[in-house]
Image (spheres, rainbow, N blue to C red):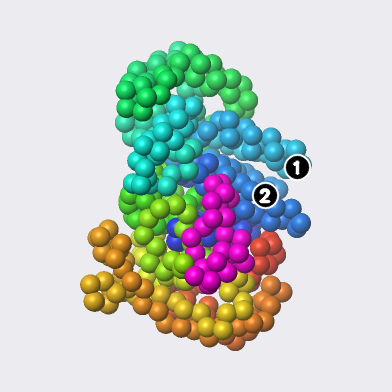
Amino acid sequence: MPALVLLGAQWGDEGKGKATDLLGGSVDYVVRYQGGNNAGHTVVVGDQKYALHLLPSGILSPGCTPVIGNGVVVDPAVLLSELSGLNERGVDTSKLLISGNAHLITPYHTTLDKVSERFLGKRKIGTTGRGIGPAYADKINRVGIRVQDLFDESILRQKVEAALDSKNQVLAKLYNRRAIAAEQVVEELLGYADQLSGYVTDTTLVLNNAIDQGQVVLFEGGQGTLLDVDHGTYPFVTSSNPTAGGACTGTGVGPTKINRVIGILKAYTTRVGAGPFPTELHDEDGEKLRTIGGERGVTTGRDRRCGWFDAVIARYATRVNGLTDFFLTKLDVLTGWERIPVCVAYEIDGKRVEELPYSQTDFHHAKPIYETLPGWSEDITQAKTFDELPKNAQKYVQALEEMSGAPISAIGVGPGRDETIQINSFL
């Protein structure tokens, strides 16, 4: 039985939640392997809409065990609030597992994130202000606090005091902010220990045993390929690895155990926050995509920047992730355009470039080269098979598949759980 990675192939917000939820009924475990509550998934089940920020989308699938892996940074207050909200709506959250090695987002991380972003002014990165970057920085600097530390008050106190020795200096002398009391942080974190203890375990052991026993494990990335700290549009990226390699380091499952890598592609392109975006539209078409597509960030509430489909980015995602399949989402949003441009290459310094430039400078100056495909006006939300799509919609999907370098195995034709055309099985 397969182990699969499912990840965003653009700048995030591609509809990963729907794809994960679609597979959730057929898999035994759904695992978040990186990021924190800076990611957001919207899942529509019947007439119910769920906005998930930190929890794996599989938590909505009965019989599926949701897992937060060691590569995730966890804000305990956000996690418990999200669990409480789902419980109030009748969702069973008792099967959740959390890695004891996952790092915690503390109050001083969120404070530092917000004040440092304001300090940058026009040079700001566009973070969500939720403490993600500072938490990952502490992890790499080996001064982070892990979930397991909640259950050893002595270690927790030592780590918080050591961290605040330097951070309070920065807050006071650089940002002119009041120092944070270590005791207050310790007391807050200790208050989460009893509520989280029943969820915490050695998830690496659990997941490897599950795969060895033939169970299906789905690894769910947050954000998207172009926001990867190593392979994205640095520095306008997240602080972790949403790409396929992050699934291994973020869970402790080796690459030889992964069978499929599925990239989620929106039928056009969006991004939230600052940074280069070659196909971005600043006209009526861009506003139309934003309105029809409901392009507002699940976690941030910010309007998403919108543009035409970028095949250069799709090819890059195929390469750096080793994608075996694509799930194309929001095809229905494009209904009504007479002609639909698709970016097939860039013009940089007068030259045609068909692969993503490694130079940040070149990418900032890249101009899209478009091919225009015929559009369609028919409603496609009721289509159940590829042949039921209008001919021009079929041609659009086929063109994107050819340009992107991997087969499109599923197509989202509406927001609902059942508004999906399955072409090839992922399992």
The residue under the point 45% across, 30% down is 111
Q: Residue at x 76, y 56 (%)?
A: 47
Say left or right for 210 vs 93: left
The front one of 370 and 24 is: 370
Mark 2: few, some, or many residues within 10 Å (few <14, many ≥20)? some
Q: Which mark is residue 89?
A: 1
Q: How many marks?
A: 2
Residue sitting nearer the eye, 252 or 103: 103
Q: Magenta stretch: give its range.
A: 283-307
On residue 50, which mark appears?
2
Q: Measuring from the top left, give residue 398's x and y in whole percent.
A: 50, 80
Where is residue 378? Give x, y as percent.
67, 82
> How far across and down, in percent of the image, does residue 397 sit?
53, 78
Query: Looking at numbered disc 2 in the image, what kind of residue is underneath it?
Result: Tyr
Whether residue 219 appears in this view of the structure is: no
- Marks 2 and 1, Cα distance to the nearest angstrom? 10 Å
Q: Earlier in the sequence, mark 2 or mark 1?
A: 2
> What's the amino acid at mark 1?
Arg
Q: Is residue 297 magenta?
A: yes
User: Residue 174 versus residue 273: which sits nearer the camera?
Assistant: 174
